[in-house]
Amino acid sequence: MRKRINWGYLGSLAISVLLAFAIGAVILLAAGFNPLEAYAAMINGAFSNARHIGDFLEYAMVLCLTGLACVLGSRVGIFNVGGEGQLLLGAVVGCQVGVWLAGQSSWIVIPAAALAAMAVGGLYALIPGWLKVKVKVNEVITTIMLNTIAASLCQYLAKGPWKNPNKNMVAATAQLDPRYWFKTLIPGSGLSTAIIAAVVITLLTWYVMQKTSTGYEMKLTGQNPRFAFFSGIKTDKIVIVCMVLSGAMCGLVGMFRVYGVEHLYRSSISNQYYFEGLTVAMIAQYNPVTVIFLSFFFAVLKIGAQGMELSAGVPNQIYLIIQTVIIFFMAAESGIFSSIRAGAQRKKARADIRRKESESHV
Amino acid sequence: MDEIAVRFSHVSMAFPGVLANDDVTLDIKKGEVFALVGENGAGKSTLMNVLYGINTPTDGKVYISGREVTDFNPKTAISMGVGMVHQHFMLVPSFTVAQNIVLSREPRRGRVFFDNAAAERMTRQLVEEYGLEVDPSVPVEELSVGLQQRVEILKTLFRGAETLILDEPTAVLTPQETDELFAVIRRVVRERNMTVIIITHKLYEVLAISDRVGVMRKGQLVGVRNTADVDEQTLASMMVGRPVLYDQLEKTGTPGEEMIRVEDLTVRDNRGLVAVDGLNLGVRAGEVLGIAAIEGNGQSELIEAITGMRRPESGRITICGRDATGLSPGDIRALGLAHVPEDRLATGVSRDATVTENLLTGKQRQKQFNRFGFHQRTSTIERYARELYEKFDIRGAGTDVTAGDLSGGNMQKVVIAREFSFDCPVLIIAQPTRGVDVGAIEFIHSQIIDRRNHGCAILLCSADLDEVFRLSDRIITLYEGRITGEFSGGFSKDEIGLCMTGSRREKEAVS
């Protein structure tokens, strides 16, 4: 029960990060940049001024919520790759609800938009969840394909029925009335009051997963579904509910992006943000606490890399290289360790036999 | 002197926590049919997997045609003339017979393109040479199981096998297909001077087909006999072993009300075949009903149906007087049933969860373990787990390690501790001591009898016949999903053994 810190994991993570920066440095050198200057510019880019700090916190929030949405599914053994679609649908529907309810009090509009975004994201996740549980259709394939459908559907809505009345806006919905916008906490940045809701949701998710009987049942279901079912847990129900919640959370992130930053729907509302969150969740090995911390780390990297591009002229793709190398080493790590462990086990078994034999000769 | 096809010299094979082969020394002669028999887990398949190079032995040497095997992998074994037909066929269903047979040694046209015509020609040649009739151009998925097996045999012949290992070849065959298979075996032995090693636990098949028979028990080779010199009873007692001397278990009390009732139950297995065939049984409070059966005769499916892990096809199951047919395991547990499953790794524990979490499973919703119905009371849970850990004498690095870090025997104690502490009136126990060391067996047995004496109705199923004899008040034998015998009082091992192999039923049918 007691949480033990997994030093092996932290060690591998630290080594992977260092190696990633080292490889990044080699590439920077080869491209004719001074890696130390570039990395300094990166740190600077994230923290040099309030606007950057705001952007990095907003991005950390998105990574954290999408990462936790992914963890919510993976915990119970269903891999939600469809968060991007759920996010986009949440954004477009949440936005349109605000447009339809224009004139109402923001105390009505914002909860209604949030609920609608969650409902549409959750329902969209219900499709692959239900198919997985009832008909054993692989959720990875269905969610990926549903992403494309959702993106096209949102694009259609933004260009067609819900199009912005302004002729110059080609693929965007109507803008929200400014009184519904989330208050910006740091002027000029994307950081809005949405972060307060995000903190609450993060804490709640962490609490349910780590401290409650439900979280415990979720964990067992993900670890060994047959055992969970055998012990009396309604595994089908848990899987479907978690998948729906994962989708709802993604929908809500979309709504936060609209009400906090963009104030209307267009496809740039999310630049594959769910996949970035999913990456964080994978590197965190689906541990919710680790997801929270890593969200900040990767947000610094990403926003810093953008700053670095402006100040030092280094292409921000270096961020992608570093991120990819970390994933590469984290994935290789489990393979390396398990082969070391298997070797040790064989050795031990042999030694046991020898000992037994020598004892029986005595 | 006879030529030796295969020689095992002091071969031992250890898996974590189990010694699957213990110092096995055995010569198999060229041109003989050698049968390897033994109960489940006796180490027959492990030994053959060593020969086929799937397992690298922890100790000892293996010689094939006089040459020592230095590199254990199937490729080497095949090149040294060993072929193996597994219980589960390794064929590509959508490929034709010819394509499956030449797989990995495909004839090519211009070094690149697969030459289907040549493949079919080669297969036809092989078919004629050995007289194993099968159409090379038919996709394997359209063939019956018996013919698929024939394709497997042809495949090994195509690869130049001189020694053929058949792992429980008749388990999936109808009696007619079995007869055909035996004819094939006789032909390849007689005409090609091949060596055939056949793993089985059907004793009458041993008598029908083999020249010599080796009996394995608990990883050791306990004897090799000429088939002509033995009968089924001798083999059965060799397989089971002399009665082990245990302390006498004290059984008290008289059976009470009927707690488990199974009526006309029919269950299908994963392949859709009838595994339990219109079965009826009842277990009363304070009674242990033992099931004696060779693996694959429906006992697993019967237990899965009773405990809700598998939906029955038809029939009725009553637990504690309430209808439990087709309910989920959770709902059946709520009626008062606890279950020690046969496969602890797949079903009995979560290896990645801690010992504490594994001990808690099933009780997480009980009031004492959470506040307001959701917040886990961590310290209460930890205290409870430590109590069970002590009481059931679990030995490991404490309750905080993952269950996967425990040895097999201690993992089993975790399962027993959890299931027995539900304090249920009905217990279903399968393979309670598989892979468990002697001391722990003694402890688990006394716990089972303790539950019985407290008025629990217990259905026990074990591949270890000694265990069934020792613990049961009554014993039923299952063969092909039907009850072939029921015994109470003084059990006769020989008679039960015969019922288990189905030979008794045939006699009854005659008389």
Image (cartoon, grey):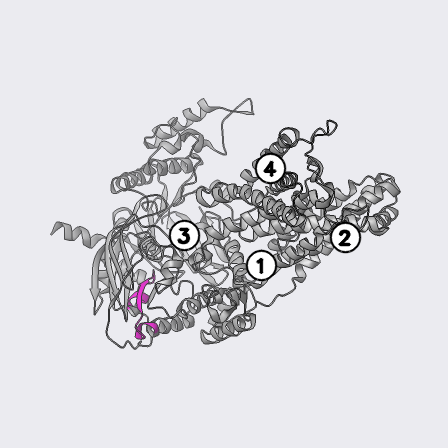
Q: What residue sits right under mark 1 in the picture? A: A209
Identify whether B137 is placed above or below B364: above
Can residue B304 be seen from the camera position used here? yes
Indicate the secondary structure of the residue bearing disc 1: helix
Q: Is residue B420 left or right of residue A362?
A: left
Q: Is residue B133 magenta?
A: no
Q: What's the chain of the residue with tag 1?
A: A
Q: Residues within 10 Å of mark 4 (few under 14, many from 20)?
A: many
Can residue A43 be seen from the camera position used here? no
Indicate the secondary structure of the residue bearing disc 3: helix
The amino acid sitting under disc 4 is: Asn
Q: What residue sits right under mark 3 in the picture? A: B45
Q: What residue sits right under mark 4 in the picture? A: A147
Indicate the secondary structure of the residue bearing disc 4: helix
Q: Contact, CB < 8 Å: mark 2 with mark 4?
A: no
Dividing the picture into quarters, in which one does residue A163 lie? top right
Front residue (pair B177, B403): B403
Where does residue A125 sit, x and y in percent of width and height? 55, 43
Query: Mark 4 or mark 1, which has the lower sequence index?
Result: 4
Task: Say whether mark 3 and mark 4 are on the same chain.
Answer: no
Q: Is residue B130 left or right of residue B379?
A: left
